[in-house]
Amino acid sequence: QVQLVESGGGLVQAGGSLRLSCAVSGSTFSISDIGWYRQAPRKDRELVAAVNPGGTTNYADSVKGRFTMSRDNAKNTAYLQMNSLKREDTAVYYCNFVTPKRVYWGQGTQVTVSS
């Protein structure tokens, strides 16, 4: 059974940093795409960043230059380093793990950026 465990969310002032982690168990992590999505109140869920098995990353325009996504295949964990946070980054962040059979979602972690 595939499980995703997210951590690292919290409250931070604008301009600050947070690092989110997503630990995956129950599947072959190294051959799967993994990403981070976020959903702010009254808005649709949107892609923030993703990384493929080869390490190629893809970012939303709104976070380019501020966020960095990485993966550690030895630890079955993906990370999202978020720097220069803005109030508009406030949202619930979800880890997304794609296998050939289905897509899995984490439970979500709240990120709140205060001014």
Image (spheres, grey):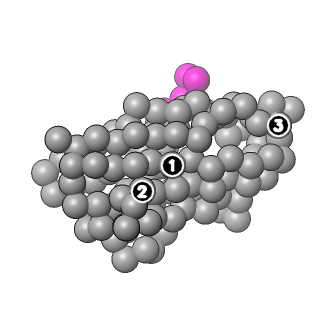
Is 64 contained in the magenta span?
Answer: no
Q: Residue furthest bottom?
A: 54
Check disc 2 and report the residue beneath it: 77
Check disc 3 and report the residue beneath it: 13
Front residue of this view, candidates 79 and 14:
79
Please tell me in which quadrant of the rendered image residue 86 appears: top right
Residues in magenta, as a range: 39-44
Q: On residue 101, which mark appears?
A: none
Does dot 3 land on a helix, a strand or a loop? strand
Check disc 1 and report the residue beneath it: 21
Q: Main secondary structure of the magenta part?
A: loop
**Does label 3 or label 1 sit earlier along the sequence?**
3
Q: Distance of mark 2 from mark 1, alpha carbons?
A: 7 Å
For the residue marked with disc 2, what is the amino acid?
Thr
**Does label 2 or label 1 sit earlier along the sequence?**
1
Tell me the quarter of the image containing the C terminus. Answer: top right
Q: Residue 51 appears at what percent x and percent y? A: 43, 65
Q: Residue 65 appears at what percent x and percent y? A: 70, 65
**Is any part of residue 62 visible from this angle?**
no
Q: Residue furthest right?
A: 115
